Image (cartoon, rainbow, N blue to C red):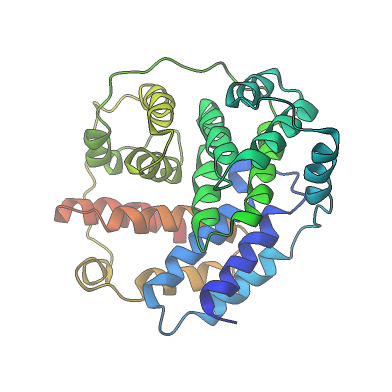
Amino acid sequence: MSLTKTIKSYFDHSVASIFNGTSNKHPIIVLNALKNIIGDDRQNPSQRLLDAMAALAEKYPQRKDDKAVLDTLAKEGLGNTVFIADLEDACQSGDSLAMEKEAARVQWVSENGLAGLDCLIEVALQDFDRLGTFAYHLQRANIFQQDVKNTWHYSRSLLKEIVKAPLPVPHSKKDVNPELIMNTILTKRIDSPISNFAAAIRLWEGEYVRISGYRRELSHWYSKFNFDQQIEINEKGMKGLENYVKNGGNFFIQMAEELTANQEWELQIIELEALRYFSNKVTSNKDLVDISSYLKEIIK
C-alpha cells in the first residue's frame, strides 16, 4: 500500500473511533499533525512516526453503525425538501438524534458529500476553544485523498464531538486583522495553545464554500485576546531551526520521533506541528527566536 493510502486508512479508522475524551485531544488531530511532519521527507518517511500513527489509529474501539444510520433514514424517506438551516437548528438545540437525522439527510442529497461537513464545521467554530483545532484537522484529514463515500464517517465524528457540550449561539462578526495577529502571536504567552492559533489562521486563509461564516466565528474568537503587550525573549534560536526554514529537512521529524517516547506525546505533537506551520511563515530572526522559545517549552 502506498504511503498516502496508508495514512488515509489511519484517518478513516480514527474518525470512526468511540472517543470519550475532550475534543482538542482527539486522535485525528495528532494523526493529521504527524502526516504533516512526515511530509517533510516523503522519500524516506519516518517509520517511527508511521508506527505511532498505526498504534494511535487502533487505540480506541470503533463505531459500527455509521452506515446503518444513513440506510435507516433512506428507508424512512428524505422528505420533500432538505435545508441546511434544519441541520444548524438541530445543532443549536443539542438534540443528538435530530442532529444525526438532519446531517444524514444532507449527506444523501449532497453531490460532493461535503455540504453537511462544511455546515458542521461552521457550527463547531461557535465554540472554537473546544472544537476549533479538532474541526480544522478533521477537515484536512477528510480532504487528504478524499473519498466521497467516506465523508459521512468524518461528519459523524464531528457530530459526536459537538454534542458533548451545549453550543453558544452564533456570534456577530468582529473587526479584526488576522494578518497582524499572525505577525505578533509568537511574542505572546496567551492562555490558549499555540495550536489553536495555527488552526484559526489556516481556517481563515482557506478557500471554503462557507468561508464568510468561518471568518465570522473566527473574528469573534480573535477579538477576545489582547495583542497589545509583547514579551521580549532574550534567547538564541535553536540549532537547526534556521537551516530548516531555509532548506527544509528533518528538524521537526527528529523532534517528533523523540517526543513519541514521552507520556504526553500526543499533545506535544499537536503543538510541535503548529510551530512547524509558523516556522514556514517566519519573516525575521526574531520569529526564529520566538519559535525556539516555544519549542524549548515542549521538549523540556
**Residue 22 visible in the snapshot:** no
Q: Is residue 245 visible?
A: yes
Pick whichever, 4 or 152, lies toward us.
152
Q: Residue furthest toward the left?
A: 284
| Residue 53 left/right relative to 74 | left
Residue 12 falls in image quadrant: bottom right
Q: Is residue 37 left or right of residue 153?
A: left
- Residue 260 image point, x, y percent: 57, 68
Q: Is residue 98 left or right of residue 286?
A: right
Where 242 sits versus 76, above or below? Answer: below
Name of the residue lying farthest toward the bottom: 44
Q: Is residue 275 above or below residue 50?
A: above
Q: How many marks?
A: 0
Residue 135: x, y in percent? 54, 42
Question: Where residue 4 sits: x, y (%)?
Answer: 52, 73
The quadrant holding residue 296 is bottom left
Quarter of the rendering occupied by the N terminus: bottom right
Residue shown at 16%/52% (left/top)?
Answer: 283
Expressed as whole percent of the image width and height from the top left, the position of residue 107 reads 65, 41
Q: Residue at x 65, y 56 (%)?
A: 149
Q: State whether residue 110 is above or below residue 272.
A: above
